[in-house]
Structures are given as structure tokens and as C-alpha cells.
Amino acid sequence: MIKMGDPRSLGVPASEARLNFDTELQELGGGPRRRLLMVDDEPAFELSFYCGTCPLLFRRLETAREKLSLESMRERLTGTLADPDDGGVIEAFGTLLAEGEYLPLLLEVEPRLVIPGREGDYFSGEQVTTWGIDQFWGLPEYPHTPYYRTFETAVDSDAHLYEFVVPMVPPTWNERQRVEEYVALMEQGTVPTAVAISTLDVCQPAIDRGDDYFVHWGLTHFLLDGHHKLEAAATAGRPVRLLSLLTLGESLAGAEDTARLPALRTQSRTARRIGR
């Protein structure tokens, strides 16, 4: 954690916002309505169910094809942001979001790229230890996207915080030359800044089916700007700063949970040990 701003109202009316949260319309005889992250009025990601007992989820959908970077902020974000309010970045990206209350968090992260189903995958690792595999499919949850793991720490003996950075489009869509340019800058000591809209989802299964029954706190950052920077940082093993605009109204977390987040984010990084 570098610095936390004050909670503030940001955004434009939902009908004018490029990014907003929504709930899928209920079809006659259909299953539970999905909680969605929408981009340009198209469902981009399916998120954790509202119940709070289903597994943590961010699943990329077929219509997730757009980044939300702002050319006007490109030069400012190539360098290190020292304060959330530096350079009007919050206000600029606030124009992309639906009206709501947001908590700005300026973090420094060292991203590690994860491929679903491979080593380090949360969904086939830590999540399975608590929920087991999906009872219908007989498989772990599948996010349909590579993503970055950046941080984790103990909330208490019965809860653990996991942090993820999720690109709007896969790293394979990035321009190779721009990634290499950022790698070169980082190797010279530059720490560029990315921007994300974030959720905090607190999830715990209703029934103990796994080997380690505990509460999962999922801090998930959906990239607005910084796709090339995150890949470059993961490639070079370098840090990058992340300005997170945490939605307070659309997270599956209570006010007391959200209030604890800044202090948790200053703790040492620690992995969960099964049963502890």
C-alpha cells in the first residue's frame, strides 16, 4: 500500500458510462441471475454470485473485447504516481464509470502471470481446497482468461485475502513492441502506473466439502489502463503501481470489511496453510 484516498462519489449516469455493474435479466424458468461487469453495454465478466456462499468468480465472457485506456493519461501514467490525486487521473477515469461511491487505493504490486489450470492457479488450487470441484461439471471453476496474482495475506485464522489483477483482454492481444518498451523502462528503474476498477468479494461456502474451510476475501482489480505494463512487469520481475478505484456499492463486502482492507494491504505477504 502506497496511499489511500478518501471515499468519493465518481461517475456518470449508468446509461452514459462505458463500464458499469448489472444483473442479468431473469428468463422464465432460468437459473439464478448472473452478476455482471458490463463494458459498452455488453457483458464482459461474470462475477461472484450475490449469495456470498458460492465460489469467488471472475469469468471472461465472449463479448469482453475492449480496453478502456485513455490516451490523454498515457504520458502521465508512464511514470510513477505518488498520490491517488496526482494529475487528475481519478477524475479522468471517473468519467468512464457509473455513478457510485469509490475508494481510491494506490498500491505497488509485483504481478505474476497465471494460466488457468496450471501452477499457481487460484481456481484449481486454493478454491478447490475449500469448495471442492463443481458438483455438476466435476471440474474447478474456470475464468476463461489468464490473470495476475499479486498479493495475499491472512485476515485472521478463519479468513484469507487473495488479490488478482484481471486484464480486459488476454496478454496475447498486447502489442509486443509496447511490452518490450515498458520492460526497457522498468529495467532503467521506472515504475509506471496502471489503473483499475476493483471489487472486494467476501465468500464462504454454506457446506464444508473441502479440505480447508475458511472465508475467502477476493480483491479483484479489472484493468482500465495498463495491459502492456502488467505483462512487462511480470516478464521483467519488476513492480508496477496500481491505482485501484474500489467500488463500495457493488462489492460483496460489508462496510466493516472494506474498512479493514487498507490495513490488511499493508501486512506482509503470507500464503494460506491448509487448516490454519
Image: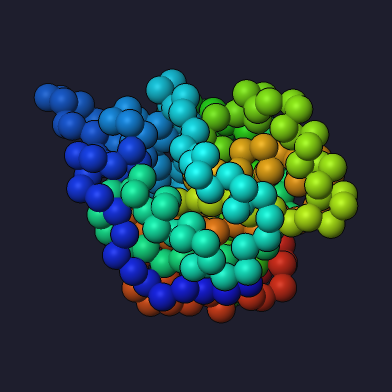
Residue 242 in percent (x, y) is at 60, 57
Q: Is residue 181 depicted above or below 258 in this figure?
A: above
Q: Nearer the viewer, residue 119 or 237?
A: 237
Give the residue at x 42% y 35%: 45
Could you say which quadrant of the image residue 150 lies in? Answer: bottom right
Which image quadrant: the C terminus? bottom right
Residue 142 in percent (x, y) is at 54, 32
Which image quadrant: the N terminus? bottom right
Instruction: Judge whether residue 49 can be spotted in this image.
Output: no
Instruction: Count the numbered circles shown.
Output: 0
- 109 relative position to 201: left or right: right
- 47 relative position to 131: left or right: left
Task: Spot the residue most to the left.
Answer: 28
Task: Spot the residue most to the top.
Answer: 62
Give the residue at x 42% y 52%: 92
- 261 relative position to 194: left or right: left
Give the residue at x 49% y 68%: 85
Q: Nearer the viewer, residue 160 or 42?
A: 42
Q: Is residue 167 depicted above or below 151 in this figure?
A: above
Instruction: Judge whether residue 80 can be spotted in this image.
Output: yes
Give the residue at x 67% y 49%: 78
Residue 213 in percent (x, y) is at 54, 60
Q: Nearer the viewer, residue 202 or 233?
A: 233
